[in-house]
Image: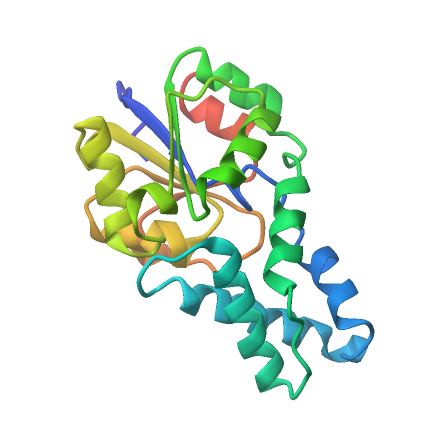
Amino acid sequence: MKTANFRPEYISFDCYGTLINYQTEAATRPLLADRVPEELMAAFMRDWRHFRYDQVCGDYYPYEQVLQDAWDRVCQKWNLTGTEDAGKQFGAAVRSWGAHDGVIEPLKRMGESYKLVILSNADDSFLQTSVPRLEAPFHAVYTAEQAGFYKPRYGAFEYMLEQLDASPEDFVHVSSHTRYDLMPAHDLGFSNLVMLDRGYDPHSPAYNYSTVASLNELNKLLGL
């Protein structure tokens, strides 16, 4: 990320997993009801994550159904009986989660000097619940429902650019996800990319992003 005399117009964020603590395993275990042995749980969670990713690579449709379809697929792979209302249960869980530790105060500080934007892989109703929990002033909040695309589809990022009448060089884009955010953003010409490393994805240094361990560290890079 550029630092010397560089002041972006916008700092854009992924929301779930990056700012909001995406507690997938805690929401998954009650649906499994001990049907997956503990020693295989990490492998199941990995497959579940991969199916969620694959499910958003096509046309947009509501996020709870995305979750339901991905759950059905992972259960089929593992020869498990599916759960009819899994999408609704996961959706309710997502709406209940709060910010990661170390997010609220540095995000507020950032918002005093920069225009903050969210580009989220969820529907409007999710963000209406989650964004107030971040307690920061956001210039704009964009969702997959508004864009008609989920990340990593380029259309999600293009929608944000169109709405703000902006160019990729106007942004620092921050995410904890390489495949959903940093890779497609890089492909579209976003040159100021930051991974807020929460251990979700393997590093991909060829995509030329900076890595920080906290928003406080990012604030230092921004001169705050």
Q: Inspect this view and state whether residue 50 appears.
A: no
- The image quadrant of residue 133 is top right
Quarter of the view holding residue 5? top left
The residue sitting at 62% across, 56% down in the picture is 88
Q: Is residue 169 visible?
A: yes
**Residue situated furthest front in the rendering:** 84
**Number of on-image labels:** 0
Residue at 21% across / 43% down in the picture? 158
Query: What x and y, as percent, mark residue 107?
Result: 52, 23
Q: Nearer the viewer, residue 206 or 196?
A: 196
Q: Is residue 87 above or below residue 43?
A: above
Instruction: Please state, as top left, top right, bottom left or bottom right, where the N terminus lies in the image.
Output: top left
Q: Is residue 222 left or right of residue 163?
A: right
Q: Quadrant of residue 31?
A: bottom right
Spot the residue most to the bottom: 79
Q: Toward the viewer: 10 or 29? A: 29
Residue 42, image x and y in percent?
A: 68, 71
Q: In the rendered view, tell whether residue 39 sits above or below residue 171.
A: below
Residue at position x 35%, y 50% from top?
182
Pick the residue in front: 22 or 66. Answer: 66
Q: Say left or right for 98 vs 26.
A: left
Percent x, y of residue 47: 56, 74
The x and y percentages for residue 18 are 53, 42
* Residue at horizontal 31 percent and vertical 62 percent from the top: 59
**Image vertical order of residue 200 relative to residue 224, above or below:** below
